[in-house]
Amino acid sequence: MNLGIGMPEAMSAVAYEEGKLDDVTLTVEPGGIGGQPASGLSFGAVSNADAIIDQPAQFDFYDGGGLDQAFLGLAETCQEGHVNVSRFGSKLAGAGGFINITQNTRDIYFLGTFTSGVQEILISDDGLKILKNGPVKNSERRFSKLHLTVSTPQSVIRELLLSPSGRYFASVNKGYC
């Protein structure tokens, strides 16, 4: 399972907290396999890794279809399911391993929010509540960059769960170009 940057990188901490880290094998593009991938500015590092291989070998594994699942972040998406992962307004972050990972991974999950920037969020026993959305909309009709194009959205998007809080979780099967 690959964890991308952004919201997905927090999944390793949750898996650790819930005692589930040994139930999955997490990978990151720099070569970490197993263990607990770091997040934030340390993204790419792994503690207690089962193995660390060089990055070209990790990409051979991804390109060869070695991943069952990938949890990826995104910069923009739209109702058709197209995805931009590298441009955030005027900032260009690059696509990283996105293209390699999405081409041969069986199940791909995108995690993100409909807005970005400073948000006010309340987490309580009653659930998650968005008090104030961020100023930048992440759901666009036209993208500055396009990395994943859904050719037949009805057959490709298997699952799109929307919550009243404005967060979304989408899963995409193969079938894109």
Image (spheres, rainbow, N blue to C red):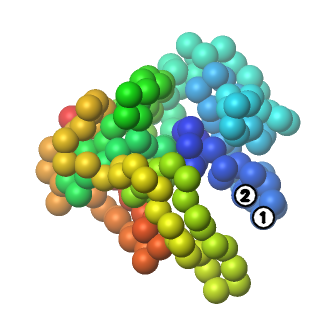
The quadrant in which residue 154 appears is bottom left
- Please identify the quarter of the rendering in which residue 74 is found: top left
Q: Secondary structure at mark 1?
A: loop
Identify the residue shown where x is 37% and y is 34%.
89
Q: Is residue 90 left or right of residue 34?
A: left
Identify the residue at horizontal 39%, vertical 69% (top origin). Answer: 161
Nearer to us in this view, 29 or 144:
144
Where is residue 59? Give x, y as percent. Answer: 52, 21
Q: Residue 68 appears at what percent x and percent y? A: 50, 45
Q: Which residue is mark 2?
A: 14
Against 133, residue 42 (above or below) is above
| Badge 2 element | helix
Q: Residue at x 29, y 37 (%)?
A: 148
Whether pointer 2 and pointer 1 mark residues with C-beta atoms closer than 8 Å, the reply is yes
Disc sitting over residue 86 in the figure = none
Q: Is residue 12 visible?
A: yes
Residue 169 vs 5, above or below: the answer is below
Count of marks, rendered view:
2
Q: Quadrant of the C terminus?
A: top left
- Camera-side residue: 144 or 149? 144
| Image quadrant containing the N terminus | top right
Which class describes the residues within 10 Å of circle 1: few (<14), some (14-19), or many (20+)? few
Residue 10: horizontal and vertical position, in percent? Answer: 66, 50
In the orientation shown, which residue stands out farthest toward the right? 48
Badge 2 density bin: few <14, some 14–19, many ≥20, Cα 10 Å:
few
* Cα distance between the residues tagged 2 and 1: 6 Å
Expressed as whole percent of the image width and height from the top left, the position of residue 95 reads 42, 26
The residue sitting at 70% across, 84% down in the picture is 125
Label 1, on which residue?
Answer: 18
